[in-house]
Amino acid sequence: MENVFEAKVAQDYINRINKLVEDTHGLWGRMTVDQMLAHCCITYEMVYEPEKHKKPGTIAKFILKTFVKPKVVGEKAYPRDSPTAPQFLIQGRRNFHEEKKRLIGYIQKTQQLGASAFDGKESFSFGKLNSQEWNNMFAKHLNHHLAQFGV
């Protein structure tokens, strides 16, 4: 798994994002490219702007930590057409350039903060994660959706 906290890796993700254009079509799934960028931003919003999202309740958090967390923070890649959690669904079109800029900004901020800022940091849905788990979550999600759009 690439290390999103390394400058070169972060730049590689940014370079892939910069290959996208407004009419890039996905190889699978229903999202448009602007929706995909907005969707990818949600992972970072939950870290940097948690007030934008409703926290899961006690029962939901238990289910997320027990059953979903291992799939999200583990090293195994997501299969095509994996189900999307309701809070990650994007309704309607978004501004492609705005979403692209936001996602790149989040990637840069995460890399600049570094792994130590994430070690033991509380996740919105999964409780405390170590920096490797945070890395896996960020890298897997980005790789999955950038591959979905052929970059």
Image (spheres, grey):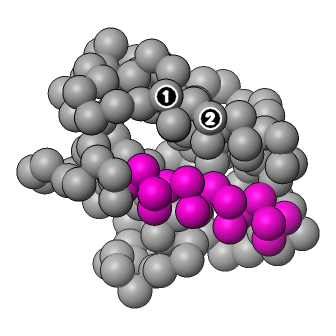
For the residue marked with disc 2, what is the amino acid?
Asn
Q: Secondary structure at mark 2?
A: helix
Q: Is residue 142 above or below residue 126?
A: above
For the residue marked with disc 1, what is the amino acid?
Lys
146 or 87, which lies in front? Answer: 146
Residue 29 lies in what quarter of the image? Answer: top left
147 or 53, which lies in front? Answer: 147
- Looking at the image, which residue is at 79% across and 34% down? 2
Q: Using the image, tell me which numbered label, if any, was put on residue 19.
A: 1
Q: Which residue is mark 2?
A: 15
Q: Residue furthest left?
A: 92
| Neighbours of disc 1 within 10 Å: few (<14), some (14-19), many (20+) | few
The picture places residue 75, in percent across and down from the top left corner, at 72, 31
| Neighbours of disc 2 within 10 Å: few (<14), some (14-19), many (20+) | few
The picture places residue 54, in percent across and down from the top left corner, at 32, 78
- Looking at the image, which residue is at 68% across and 60% down? 108
Q: CA distance from mark 1 to mark 2?
A: 7 Å
The picture places residue 129, in percent across and down from the top left corner, at 74, 63
Q: Is residue 6 above or below residue 146?
A: below
- Looking at the image, which residue is at 63% across and 48% down? 138
Q: Is residue 77 left or right of residue 121?
A: left
CB atoms at circles 1 and 2 under 8 Å apart? yes
Q: Secondary structure at mark 1?
A: loop
The picture places residue 92, in percent across and down from the top left corner, at 10, 51
Residue 30 seen from this side = yes
Q: Which residues are magenta?
A: 99-114
Residue 140 seen from this side = no
- Report if residue 100 lies within the magenta region: yes
